């Protein structure tokens, strides 16, 4: 392809909005409700097998949104943190009856148990699920849609949430730039063992923090100078009308939310790690869990079906009507 | 005439700063004025603009004295958001002011905040897209845009709000010459059509002086000159020529000491006495040149320019430091950015790489030290294939300064930044002292040693980052838009420094939109476009006769003295009897023939 043709391709690509996929096709409120309930499930569930299935649903949502690659940095962070938790907890948790290894140190009594290991794993799974749900919000849902949605509810909190969800992508990009700049002046960031690599990267962390603070200040100044926070704000976003598909997802998310809240109150999803591990398998056949899983998985199955089309893709948006 | 905005004895000091950024500034801005604010790095230009927008003191805090009123509202009472409908502000760094994720929504953001009806937003967004030539990018994500494109989006977002007072902080710093002209034309249109007052802080006066109805020169936070462009030119002619556009400098040169005195003297009838006027544009200069030639003045090319002006340094070894062979790169599969690029750079050369915004210049240079790997083809540094090196290893041969100087700062002081580079490169003993001293002296950093690099102005930051990259003395130095935000004095100093680095045996490649800088300091120019190299040769050959990638002086003299790029290559003299009157001359053997 010639460069001229390539420029044409680039121009055409940019002349059309990027197609929305997966949860981004839903009304912003429906997408937000669904992601929130996934994160809530990550907090409430305790059974490691249930948590594995929850993770599978979140990964499926990323896949359907074709955003798995974009979510990889988040998943990496989740795995690092989860791994850290999984290793530390058995060393310092100490609970459980099935002792695998024990050590009496002057100031520390280390007692590794099967229950401690399982709890560490379970905690790691919960953390991974919550971070993955956060990744889903950031990389699949449309950030501008979310800002507009939340600004209608409460503009200031909308800003806080919007900045919070964009912070990680901005930090990632800035981090890459700083790393490139440092390599370009001869800093070897990837040589040697972990300690050396960590030492080489430490100054970058400070620079990244400073730069992100500077950027936050600049953006805030820009927003202030552009009238952000004035009363009577209007919305021009290409707002979709709420449609049956959106209502379906919101209804399922609400149902799942109620189930989780009830489960929290009445211990439907209880699972004990100490003093002895509960058997995790019966939890998968629990009717409350089956209902919850169906409510969480159904929207993704529905969005993944090849014949699924949101009627709004054919219907004119409000914004199109304005035109 | 009514006043749009007024500063009365404003003195302002940023929190923690030891000296004021503005000192006793009093100015008034009238409707439809286009005010150009010039001054060195850290002179207070940006702070002046922020004071007019109300960001100083509301957003930044600090100690504020005096009074600023915008459309009758005192900024001590009115917050920036209250002024937003009347005041539009385009910041220096377009990336840091983007709030939304796509172009269209970014433009609509300010209108939404102002409570404009959605129907009207649609129309205003469309108009802004058309005015700035952004229609094809309407749905593009901001993270995918080049710096120049982002700058246009930032302006479009402000233009859409139709402000009465438009504040522009170096709006053309990242734009190629064509985009820059388009952008400034849009600004002028806004002023003419709506009566908006424009206050424009800019270092590249040759790009915008002709638009200005008034020029304010600032130094150390104070207003030194506030006059119309001719008055400013008269003031600058004797001792601050670098502040003038090249064609004006050419005519200052003609005037000589007497002429300068005449030009700075009282001029009760400036409009009609052309001999006392200095041209601001090529068109003005052409008319004046005709008058001068008719009077028998002769303009000649200097012998040095006839042999090609700036040339590669004479070195015992002209070893190739960089060789690019058949390099292709793609943004994504099927969308190539660069195709089969061949390029060679030798020791002693200063090469300017130019091209329109988005042409792939940055993509190309990021291959030089391995930040990007070639899809096909190869890059060799001193004969070694970059594919086999880490970026840090390649940095010993190729120092690359990117577009964002702040990304280089990881230490608390300027001195520590230089030391950090030398530590990383394991430079010890006498060499270390020599390199450190040279970097500090060459980049004029002695006064900044104890300062935090992040507290410095844009131009100063660039110098410090460049010093950090160059401290290790790599044989190839690549600089991506280094003159962005740099004042003329430091820009000239940088150009001379690059020349000295080349003379010392290094190869230097500068990615730049600054044609005047390239013409003056590069020996060779490469123009990139359509994914390929469109021109590559001595700077005089490549820039001579080009419509946009050429200098003011060349556009003025291309038919009379082909090859002339800047005023220092030219000399005026009075006609002798043997000379035909009204003729510009070149010395014998010159590429420029008498016309």
Image (tube, coloured by chain):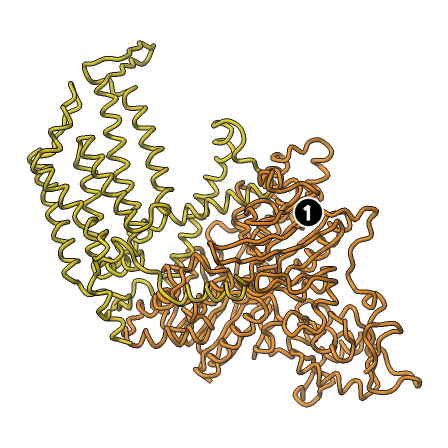
- Report how many numbered discs are placed on residues in the image: 1
> Residue drawn at (85%, 87%), measured in percent from left and top?
B581
Image hue for chain A: yellow
The x, y position of residue A300, in whole percent, is: 21, 49
Q: Camera-side residue: B577 or B36? A: B577
Quadrant containing the C terminus of chain A in the rendered view: bottom left
Q: Where is mark 1, residue-wise?
A: B476
| A47 sits left or right of B526 in the view | left
Q: Nearer the viewer, residue B374 or A129?
A: B374
Q: Nearer the viewer, residue B326 or B293?
A: B326
Say whether residue B67 is visible. Answer: no
Residue at the image point whose x is 36% and y is 75% from the top: B124
Task: Name the residue at the bottom extreme.
Answer: B272
Residue A77 location in percent, x, y?
36, 37
Asked if B68 appears above or below B32 in the picture, the reply is above
Question: In the rendered image, is residue A234 in sight?
Answer: yes
Residue B488, image x, y percentages: 65, 63
* Secondary structure under the numbered disc 1 in the rendered image: strand
- Residue A173 rendering spot, x and y as whole percentages: 44, 48
The crowding category of the residue bearing disc 1, from other C-alpha atoms within 10 Å (few below 14, some 14 to 19, many at least 20), is many
Q: Residue furthest right?
A: B578
Q: Give the vertical position of B366 relative to A226 (above or below).
A: above
Q: Which chain is orange?
A: B
> What residue is at 67 percent from the left and 83 percent from the top?
B284
Quarter of the view holding residue B280: bottom right
Say whether residue B359 is left or right of residue A34: right
Q: Residue at x 15, y 18 (%)?
A: A275
In the rendered structure, the residue with mark 1 lies on which chain? B
């Amino acid at each position: 392809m010639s460069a001229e043709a390539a420029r044409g391709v680039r121009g055409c690509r940019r002349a059309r909005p990027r197609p929305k996929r997966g949860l981004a096709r839903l009304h912003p409120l429906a997408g937000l409700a669904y992601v929130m309930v996934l994160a809530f499930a990550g907090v409430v569930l305790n059974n490691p097998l249930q948590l594995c299935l929850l993770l599978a649903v979140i990964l499926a949502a990323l896949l359907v949104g074709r955003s798995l690659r974009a979510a990889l940095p988040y998943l990496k962070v989740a795995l690092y943190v989860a791994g850290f938790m999984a290793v530390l907890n058995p060393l310092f948790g100490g609970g459980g009856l099935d002792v695998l290894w024990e050590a009496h140190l002057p100031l520390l009594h280390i007692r590794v148990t099967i229950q401690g290991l399982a709890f560490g794993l379970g905690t790691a799974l919960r953390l991974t699920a919550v971070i993955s749900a956060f990744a889903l919000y950031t990389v699949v849902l449309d950030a501008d849609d979310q800002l507009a949605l939340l600004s209608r509810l409460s503009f200031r909190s909308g800003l806080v949430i919007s900045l919070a969800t964009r912070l990680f992508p901005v930090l990632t990009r800035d981090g890459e730039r700083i790393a490139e700049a440092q390599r370009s002046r001869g800093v070897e960031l990837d040589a040697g063992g972990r300690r050396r690599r960590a030492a080489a990267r430490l100054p970058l962390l400070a620079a990244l923090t400073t730069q992100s603070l500077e950027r936050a200040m600049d953006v805030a100044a820009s927003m202030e100078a552009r009238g952000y926070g004035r009363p009577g704000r209007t919305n021009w976003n290409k707002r979709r009308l709420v449609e049956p598909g959106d209502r379906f997802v919101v209804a399922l998310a609400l149902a799942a939310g109620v189930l989780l809240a009830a489960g929290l109150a009445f211990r439907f999803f209880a699972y004990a790690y100490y003093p002895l591990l509960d058997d995790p398998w019966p939890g998968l056949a629990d009717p409350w869990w089956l209902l919850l899983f169906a409510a969480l998985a159904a929207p993704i199955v529905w969005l993944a079906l090849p014949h699924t089309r949101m009627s709004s893709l054919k219907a004119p948006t409000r914004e199109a009507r304005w035109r | 005439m009514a006043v749009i905005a007024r500063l009365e004895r404003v003195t302002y000091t940023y929190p923690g700063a030891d000296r004021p950024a503005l000192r006793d500034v009093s100015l008034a801005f009238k409707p439809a004025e286009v005010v150009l604010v010039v001054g060195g790095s850290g002179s207070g230009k940006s702070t002046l603009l922020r004071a007019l927008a109300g960001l100083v003191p509301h957003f930044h805090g600090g100690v504020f004295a005096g009074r600023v009123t915008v459309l009758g509202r005192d900024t001590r009472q009115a917050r920036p958001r209250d002024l937003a409908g009347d005041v539009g502000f385009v910041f220096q760094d377009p990336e840091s002011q983007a709030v939304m994720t796509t172009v269209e929504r970014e433009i609509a953001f300010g209108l939404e905040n102002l409570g404009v009806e959605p129907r009207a937003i649609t129309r205003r967004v469309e108009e802004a897209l058309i005015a700035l030539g952004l229609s094809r990018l309407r749905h593009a994500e901001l993270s995918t845009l080049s710096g120049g494109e982002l700058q246009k989006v930032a302006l479009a977002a402000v233009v859409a709000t139709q402000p009465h007072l438009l504040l522009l902080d170096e709006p053309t710093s990242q734009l190629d010459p064509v985009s820059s002209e388009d952008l400034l034309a849009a600004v002028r249109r806004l002023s003419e059509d709506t009566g908006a007052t424009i206050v424009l802080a800019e270092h590249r006066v040759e790009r915008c002086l002709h638009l200005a109805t008034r020029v304010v020169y600032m130094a150390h936070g104070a207003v030194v000159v506030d006059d119309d462009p001719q008055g400013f030119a008269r003031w600058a002619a004797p001792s601050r020529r670098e502040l003038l556009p090249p064609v004006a400098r050419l005519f200052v040169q003609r005037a000589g000491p007497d002429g300068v005195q005449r030009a700075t003297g009282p001029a009760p009838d400036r409009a009609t006495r052309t001999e006392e006027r200095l041209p601001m544009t090529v068109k003005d200069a052409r008319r004046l040149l005709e008058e001068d030639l008719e009077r028998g003045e002769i303009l000649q090319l200097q012998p040095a320019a006839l042999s090609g002006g700036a040339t590669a340094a004479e070195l015992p070894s002209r070893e190739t430091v960089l060789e690019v062979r058949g390099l292709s790169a793609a943004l994504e599969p099927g969308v190539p950015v660069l195709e089969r690029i061949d390029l060679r750079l030798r020791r002693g050369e200063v090469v300017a790489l130019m091209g329109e915004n988005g042409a792939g210049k940055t993509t190309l240079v990021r291959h030089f030290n391995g930040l990007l790997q070639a899809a096909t083809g190869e890059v060799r540094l001193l004969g070694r294939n970059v594919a086999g090196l880490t970026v840090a290893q390649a940095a010993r041969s190729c120092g690359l300064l990117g577009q964002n100087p702040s990304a280089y700062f990881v230490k608390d002081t300027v001195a520590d930044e230089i030391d950090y580079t030398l530590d990383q490169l394991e430079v010890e003993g006498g060499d270390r002292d020599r390199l450190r001293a040279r970097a500090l002296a060459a980049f004029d950093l002695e006064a900044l040693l104890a300062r935090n690099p992040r507290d410095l102005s844009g131009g100063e930051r660039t110098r410090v980052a460049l010093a950090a990259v160059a401290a290790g003395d790599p044989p190839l130095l690549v600089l991506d838009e280094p003159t962005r935000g740099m004042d003329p004095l430091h820009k000239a100093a940088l150009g001379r420094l690059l020349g000295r680095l080349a003379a010392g045996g290094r190869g230097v490649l500068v990615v730049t939109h600054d044609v005047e800088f390239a013409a003056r300091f590069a020996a060779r120019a490469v123009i990139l476009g359509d994914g390929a190299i469109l021109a590559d040769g001595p700077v005089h050959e490549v820039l001579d006769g080009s419509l946009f990638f050429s200098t003011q002086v060349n556009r003025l003299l291309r038919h009379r003295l082909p090859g002339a790029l800047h005023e220092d290559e030219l000399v005026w003299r009075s006609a002798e009897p043997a000379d035909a009157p009204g003729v510009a001359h070149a010395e014998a053997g010159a590429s420029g023939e008498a016309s």
